[in-house]
Structure formats: C-alpha cells, structure tokens
Image: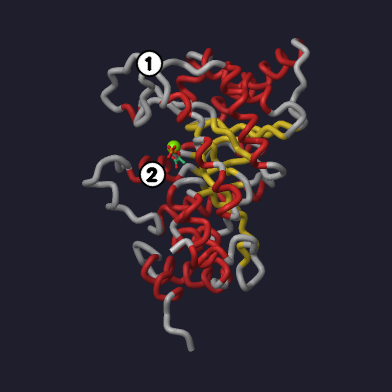
Amino acid sequence: QQERYVSLRDKPAESPDGVRVRLTMNAGLMADLPSLESSGAEGVGLFRTELQFLTQSKVPRRGELAQMYSKVLDRAGETEVVFRTLDIGSDKVLPYMKAQDEPNPALGWRAIRVGLDKPGVMRMQIQALIRAAAGRRLSVMFPFIAQLQEFREARELLFREVERERRMGHVLPGEIKVGAMLETPSLAFAPATFFDEADFVSIGGNDLKQFFYAADRENERVRRRYDTLNVSFLNMIEMIVRRCNEAGTPLSFCGEDAGRPIEAVTFAALGMRTLSMRPASIGPVKHLIRRTDLGALRKVIDEARTSGAQSVRPAVVEHLYRPAG
Ligand code: PEP
Ligand code: MG
C-alpha cells in the first residue's frame, strides 16, 4: 500500500488549480522521527510531548527532556517542529499523578488548566524546550486554550522563562513562535485580538468535534454519530479560516480527520493550507490533493450547503470519484 506513494514523497501537495498545501506529521516518540524522511512530511505540525511523561514511572528530568527535544530538532533540520506542552488529564493520566476524581474528566482539570494552576512541570518543560532550541527556532503550542486570557497567561509564563534563561546566561532560541490549539468552540468565537496575538493556530479536531457535538470521542455509541463533513461543523471551520486570514495568522488542522483524504481535500477547499497527520496518511492525502481541483470542489461544497444537505459528504464523494469523462 505504502509502495504506491513512494514516488510522491518528494513531490509537493499541489492541486491541479495551483493550490499548495503543506503536509506535516504528528509525532510524539523518538521512534517516529525516521518517518520525517520516509513520509515526505514538511516538518512536525504536532509533537505530543506527554508521551515521554506517560511512559515513565516518574517525572522526566529537565536535562533529559532538553536532550530529547534537541534530537528532534536536529532531525527536523530546516523544517519546523511544533511542540505542544503537556496535555494531561481527561484520557491521558500520568501514572505518578494522583488521579483526580472528576465526574467529567474531558470537561475537567486538564491540559493548560493544569499548566496554569500548577505551573511547576510546565515551567520545567518550557525551560527544557528553550535550552533544546538554543540558536534555533522554537515553536510552542498550548493545548486546550478555551479563552484569550488563558493564552495570554501561558504566553507570559513562557516569556518569563525565556527571561530567566537569559539571566542565567543560556543561549536563547533565535526565534520563538507561540500558538494555541483551538479545541473548544469557545475559542473560535474569541475576541479578534486572540487571532492577532497568536503566532499560529492549530485546530485540534478530535477535541473540537467532541465538544462541538457534545459527543464523547471515547464513546463508541456516539463517536461516529456526527459527520465531520456536516454543514454545521464545516461552517465553523470556515469561520476559523476567515478569522485567521483576517489576522494574517497561520492556521493548521492537526486532528485525525486531517489524515483522511476526503476530509483533507474538503478542508483544503475551504481554505486550510496546512494539515498535520500521522506519517502513513501523507501519501494518500497528497495523492488526492494532487488530483483534485480545489476551486471546483469548493463549488460542489457550496452547492451542497445551500441545497439543505446535512452533510456535504455524499456530494463530495460523488464529485471526487465520479467516472472520468
Ligand atoms: C485533537 O484534539 O485533535 C488533538 C490533536 O489532540 P489530542 O488528540 O492529543 O487530544
Ligand atoms: Mg486534543
């Protein structure tokens, strides 16, 4: 199966009507890094840092983390790596953390909420990232930002650490980009300032979809009930694309749906220019983008939306896979 896509590895994900889409990969372990070369990924759009924390019996040490992050940056070379700070709680429980007895962990004390309320571990992690990126570009993304104020606080915390590292005489990163994951509908409706202040935004579609539809991503009974290509969900995606464009802020999509070819071309037709996915999805997504006129697909999507369809999927599938001629 993968053989089919090897010849595409060094070719761009560009549609026949000239739209260039950047395909990056999601990673989280050192073992993922060889895929940077083999998949043709243009960088790491989401590095899930919690995996190092989840696979050890105690909190990893700063030096150990810095060394690992540095190796990731070495391997990525010129391409960008977006490090997501610890995203724990909900479905990701650390073995050495007291389990919080919460009735709704997905809506509970998780991710940036933990990072801001008990900043010790996140600060240590940020110090490790700053040291690893000495003289290079550092891109940090905060998970589960639900409102502007949380983004501001997280960003300030990061720059306080930068200042501290500077005072201690460490070489600082050459450039620092700070972004937010958009995983709750509230952030899509944030004050316009949010989109100006963020250096980039990445849609965490797995969580965004679960909160948009109020349908647990872990619950088999409801997980597949609502289609990603539902008009309502796409309307929100389109709004996020528009708000990012107005602010000139780069936007990507890093949930599982980015790696599904039909979803990926639909997002691209709606204006999304960076998609981050598991490495094995890059070939199939690139293949479909390279044969899909995104302008024509956009018309099909818009027609389906105005026709009162619940989901644009039937129209999109029909358009993409209609017999030639
Ligand atoms: C997401 O929510 O879409 C995402 C990429 O983060 P995770 O799957 O790690 O929650
Ligand atoms: Mg998430």
What type is the residue that disc 1 sits on?
Met
Residue at position x 38%, y 44% from top? 212
The image quarter in which residue 196 lies: top right
What type is the residue that disc 2 sits on?
Phe
Quick check: 68 above or below 5? above
Mark 2 CB within 8 Å of ligand 1: no
Q: Nearer the viewer, residue 185 or 91?
A: 91
Quick check: 309 above or below 259? below
| Residue bearing the label numbered 1 | 97
**For discs 1 and 2, the disc positioned in front in the rendered view:** 1
- Image region (quadrant) for ligand 2: top left
x then y, percent, for residue 3: 49, 64
Quick check: 6 above or below 293? above
Residue reaching furthest to the top: 168
| Residue bearing the label numbered 2 | 212
Residue at position x 62%, y 39% from top? 81
Quadrant in the picture for the N terminus:
bottom left
Residue at position x 48%, y 15% from top? 117
x then y, percent, for residue 133: 69, 29
